[in-house]
Image: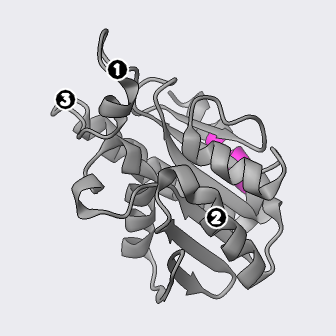
């Protein structure tokens, strides 16, 4: 069993923000395959044989609380998780897939890694670019992307969903292979 965890904030006011790109990817996955949903106090879980999707309802900075519950509820190993999140340290629309590492400046990923007690959790970062000079980073991530960014982020969301499907179907090696091939064609 493998799981895709899209990080985001559950309130409707956050749906179209940069910080909810993890949820955007989960939404794409819901469109391409049939899933059965189940609501828990800590998140919305969608399932199909061999794979799960999670949208935490614990808010971004407490995402780890939901991930720990998912791992316990479904007897998952950390290497069977793929955390999908926004990243303001990489260019708008760029993707970065890694098998492990630190959280960088992302509080949601930091919460996940702290609660799981390991940095050995695969993650797929979707670039949102840096805030303009003088803009508070929190304000930036919680705002909708500009009109010129939307096409780049929609394309990145589609590509991230393809990588997530490769992960649930074939594991991290399959996703990394697909990621490497996609980067070579750029």
Looking at the rendered structure, the secondary structure element under dot 3 is loop
Question: Is residue 52 a member of the stretch shown in magenta?
Answer: no
Kindly report the distance in space between the C-alpha atoms of the residues bearing marks 2 and 1. 28 Å
Kindly report the distance in space between the C-alpha atoms of the residues bearing marks 1 and 3. 15 Å
Q: Which mark is residue 65?
A: 2
111 sits to left or right of 28: right
Q: Which percent across, then down, holds residue 4?
A: 60, 64
List the residue tagged with mark 3. Answer: 148
Which of pointers 3 and 2 indicates the residue nearer the eye? 2
Seen in the picture, residue 120 relative to 139 is either above or below; the reply is: below
Which of pointers 2 and 1 indicates the residue nearer the eye? 2
Q: Which percent across, then down, holds residue 108?
A: 56, 47
- First along the sequence among labels 2 and 1: 2
Comparing 120 with 2, the one in front is: 120
Residue drawn at x 61%, y 68% is 66
Q: Which range is magenta?
A: 174-179
């Amino acid at each position: 069993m493998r799981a895709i965890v899209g990080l985001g904030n559950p309130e409707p006011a956050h749906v179209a923000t940069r910080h909810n790109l993890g949820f955007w990817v989960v939404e794409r996955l819901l469109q391409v395959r049939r899933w059965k949903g189940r609501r828990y106090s800590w998140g919305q879980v969608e399932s199909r044989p061999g794979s799960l999707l999670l949208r935490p309802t614990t808010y971004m900075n407490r995402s780890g609380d939901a991930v720990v519950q998912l791992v316990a509820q479904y007897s998952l190993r950390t290497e069977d998780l793929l955390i999908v999140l926004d990243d303001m340290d990489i260019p708008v629309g760029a993707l970065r897939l890694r098998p492990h590492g630190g959280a960088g400046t992302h509080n949601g990923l930091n919460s996940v890694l702290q609660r799981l007690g390991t940095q050995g959790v695969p993650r797929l970062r979707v670039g949102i670019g840096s805030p303009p000079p003088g803009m508070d980073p929190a304000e930036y991530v919680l705002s909708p992307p500009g009109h010129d960014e939307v096409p780049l982020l929609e394309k990145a969301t589609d590509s991230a969903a393809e990588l997530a499907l490769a992960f649930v179907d074939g594991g991290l090696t399959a996703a990394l292979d697909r990621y490497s091939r996609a980067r070579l064609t750029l």
